[in-house]
Amino acid sequence: MSYQFDFYDKTSLKSYNLNESMRYQLNMLDKLDVFTRKHCENVANLTCRLCEYLHCNKGFTEYCTICAYLHDIGKLFIPSAVLQKPGKLTQEEYEIMKTHTTLGYNMCMKDLQLRPYAAGAYYHHEALDGSGYPQGLTKKDIPYEGQIIRVADEYDAIVSKRQYKSHIGISDTLKILIENTKPHEEIKKSDVLTEISENARLGKNNPIIVKTLFKVVIDDIEYEIFCTETYIEELLSELKRFEQIEKYREKLEQAKKEKDKNYYLEGIKMLLKPEETLENYKTIYEEYTRAYETRKSIVDNLHKEIKIIKKLKV
């Protein structure tokens, strides 16, 4: 009776026929810790779908997806005390963490099979306004793949931190990404038109890519609704079975003749599934009822979430 929705289950990535060369790059993830590896897989899935919604050609989409898989490969060289620290990093620890970009880039450049995908590791923390790292590049110098992976990376990092079990409330995550498309308030009010301030008038994230992420998320929410409603139909079928058992139980208790009692008792036994008995079926019935009510509430809230997202402006 358990049901769990996987955010990243529905992805076009699985439709790609990855060749042996690509499998070599993906095998690099096996060296990462479980959390980082899962994050890399999630970012790659999101990146793949962003590329498709952005109408990138298949070659670039595959390239960008592999770059995304490898974007955090430099974390192999970050001390576990820093990488897996549960609390906030100190400034010194944060500086160590930031080196994963150049460490990953250097690792890729030393391996001929990884070298073509070094951009993922190097550019995914660069920001359009020049506030990113490791180089502090601005929009004109940040490759498109870096801009796409940055958005996917930021989204999954927030989702993972907040441990969403469903897309309910996910609009709050998107609002954070929207804020990162905007310049700082003091820059916005500035009339100084130098080259530096022009870059600063940009936000950190590419607004077109963030807006495209909305489409990916809405698509995912609609898929979650579909999965949940499919499960609800199964629950309804079970509830109807229990309702029939209840009717037979009432008639059994009201019956006067022994043959009638046996008739209704046999009917109940036919409706009961393995491990269900006359003694425990009501408890199971209540569990199915609660599951049904919970899933119905989830679907209602997911529909509301779609309405909120559709009203968001970048």
Image (cartoon, grey):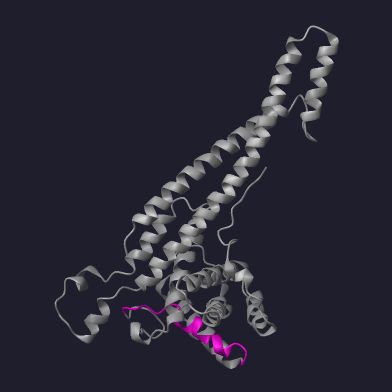
Q: Is residue 164 visible?
A: no
Tell whether 2 sits left or right of 198: right
Which residue is situated farthest in the left direction here? 191
- Of 84 and 206, which appears nearest the observer? 206
Q: Which residue sits at x=37%, y=52%? A: 308
Which residue is situated farthest in the top direction here? 256
Location of residue 44 (image quadrant):
bottom right
Give percent across and percent down for residue 301: 46, 45
- Of 213 and 237, which appears nearest the observer? 237
The quadrant the C terminus occupies is bottom left
Q: Which residues are magenta?
A: 112-129
Give percent across and percent down for residue 222: 51, 54
Picture mark count? 0
Location of residue 107 (image quadrant):
bottom right
Q: Is residue 160 above or below residue 207?
A: above
Q: Is residue 203 magenta?
A: no
Give percent across and percent down for residue 198: 23, 81
The quadrant the N terminus occupies is top right
Tell whether 71 sits left or right of 2: left
Q: Which residue sits at x=40%, y=55%? A: 171
Tell whether 195 sits left or right of 78: left
Q: Is residue 103 visible?
A: yes
Give percent across and percent down for residue 251: 73, 14
Q: Is residue 178 above or below residue 29?
A: above
Q: Is residue 123 magenta?
A: yes
Location of residue 262 (image quadrant):
top right
Q: Which residue sits at x=40%, y=80%? A: 126
Q: Is residue 19 above or below residue 155?
A: below
